[in-house]
Image: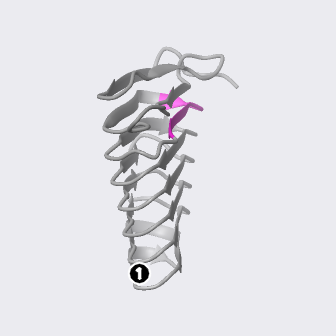
Amino acid sequence: MRKALILGLALVFVMGMTTMVGAFPAGEYVDDWYIDSTADGYWNGSEILAEIEQLYGTTDSDAEINQHNTGFSNYAGIGQHGTSLEAVINQGGYDNFARVSQGWQGFENVALVNQFGSRNRVRTRQGGDNDELYVKQHGYFNYARVEQFGTMDSYAEIVQKGEKGGAAIFQDDGNNMTAEIFQDGVENEAVINQTGGGY
């Protein structure tokens, strides 16, 4: 798989108050990036910030952040602009926040966010054709928001297992778009808002 080495730029920023974490290329090419900020110790990984930005029209690039902690108030963010990109965020603990942004200069991008714990939040945004976006949350008081705009043949899915969660999918100005929300628990709320063609 050929990478756009000249056009692809990855900015990686990691900061932690309770532990040091590292970022390094995940594959043969420098535009695949991986951060593992899983930590041990008393707080087991709290107040850790990890972010990857892949800019300027990268192609076939991957970004992954793992925060398999039982701590709190962690942040993971991935921003990508290009084609055939993949973003993965895995978080454990509570009161965490995950952000994924993929757009406006590409298509066929995939994003996956997994959160285990309570009071976690996800915000994702895509703006290309044939994009796919998946959010999975396990726990209480979790919230997920998915936005896809100006796209064709894209798919968005939120799966929540737990109580008192909230899920929202907004698909604007698109065509032939699909949105699905699956919730297992009580006192959950869900909203799907589509403009344009979709089902």
At a point 50% along the width and 56% down the height, the residue shown is 116
In the depicted structure, whether residue 35 falls above or below residue 71 = above
Front position in the image: 153 or 93: 93
As drawn, the residue found furthest toward the front would be 42
> Can residue 103 be seen in this snapshot?
no
At a point 48% along the width and 68% down the height, the residue shown is 175
Magenta stretch holds residue 103: no
* Amino acid type at mark 1: Asn
Front position in the image: 31 or 12: 12
Q: Is residue 194 left or right of residue 161?
A: left
Q: Is residue 96 left or right of residue 28?
A: left
Q: Give how far across and how far down residue 158 sits, in percent.
A: 50, 67
Q: Give how far across and how far down residue 62 sits, in percent.
A: 56, 33
At a point 70% along the width and 25% down the height, the residue shown is 1
In the depicted structure, whether residue 160 falls above or below residue 150 = below
Rate crowding at label 1 as few (under 14), some (14 to 19) or many (20 or more) other CA atoms within 10 Å. some
As drawn, the residue found furthest toward the right would be 1
In the depicted structure, whether residue 160 falls above or below residue 72 = below
Mark 1 = which residue?
A: 188
> Can residue 105 be seen in this snapshot?
yes
In the depicted structure, whether residue 147 falls above or below residue 27 = below
- Which range is magenta? 58-67
Q: Give how far across and how far down residue 164 sits, in percent.
A: 38, 77
- Location of residue 47 (image quadrant): top left
Q: Is residue 66 left or right of residue 95?
A: right
Front position in the image: 174 or 162: 162
| Callout count | 1
Magenta stretch holds residue 59: yes
Main SS, magenta residues: strand
| Mark 1, secondary structure of its residue | loop
Q: Give how far across and how far down residue 82 sits, in percent.
A: 47, 36
